Image (cartoon, rainbow, N blue to C red):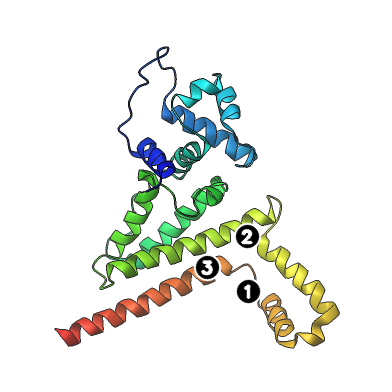
Amino acid sequence: MSGDHSKATRLLWGPHTRPARGPRPTLDLDRIAAAGVELADADGLADLSMQRVAAHLGVTKMALYRYVPGKAELVALMADAAIGPCPAPTEPSGDWRAQLRSWAVELYAAFRRHPWILDATVGPRALGPAELSWLERIVATLDGTGLSGAERMDAAVLLSGHVRALTQQARAAGPSGNAEEQLGAALGQLLQEHGERFPALGAALASAVTDEEQDQAWEFGLDRILDGLAVLIERRAKEAERSG
């Protein structure tokens, strides 16, 4: 693990030692993370800085550095605080499909509340206890289905990827629009002018409008992922019967 990741990991997981020198501590990591989240919710990550967070807390930047070594570690704290612990399942324990659907819906809601998390949770990085609890829940939900550990992990990646993709589309559309509506309008205009070059696409778009099947990417993608997992789980059950 790199030095930067090690620093973030210590902040996320502890143990947390009080500064040995200087005045009595007036801050804590929870307050610092909450201040960063508030600023990022308002303006995104691009404008976030240690100086702005310090000013928001009413302290000097040097005082903030006594708790957090840099912006990368600050963002790690913020992301874990913003996403929060994964909610406990409310569906029956044996209904893995309902539980995964609920998991996806809850993650989507968390990303919509804090869209900047999409930028903060990419690439190799330190994972905090809250973020790890989301992975724990989905892997635990699929325990006993016959899927291997690797397959359960891959299922989590596949579902979270769908959530991230739809959240990114919603963010790109802005607060006043729907991403699929905007794309459909743009496609419609292009096909009015160049439809003879793309007959299959034109027919599909016309059918979607007629059948009122637009804006279904979230449900369609989620259902197809769950359908695929159901097929794999059934296959694993048949394999277990044959081997048993």
Could you say which is closer to the camera, residue 162 or residue 100? 162
Q: Choose between 222 and 91: the one closer to the eye.
A: 222
Question: SS class of the residue under badge 2?
Answer: helix
Q: Report the disc number at residue 219.
A: 3
* Residue type, label 1: Glu
Q: Amino acid at mark 3?
A: Glu
For residue 169, the mark is 2
Dot placed on the residue nearer the N-terminal end, 2 or 1: 2
- Looking at this rendering, what residue extends furthest in the left direction? 244
Label at residue 58: none
Label 3: state its secondary structure.
helix
Residue 55 image point, x, y percent = 59, 23
Q: Residue furthest top?
A: 23
What residue sits 47% from the left and 71% below the top? 223
Residue that appears at 36% across and 56% down: 135
Q: Position of residue 84 (x, y in %)?
A: 42, 43
x, y percentage for residue 21? 38, 15
In the rendered image, which residue does mark 1 sit on?
213
Residue 192: image location, x then y, percent: 83, 78
Is the C-beta separation of discs 2 and 3 under 8 Å?
A: no
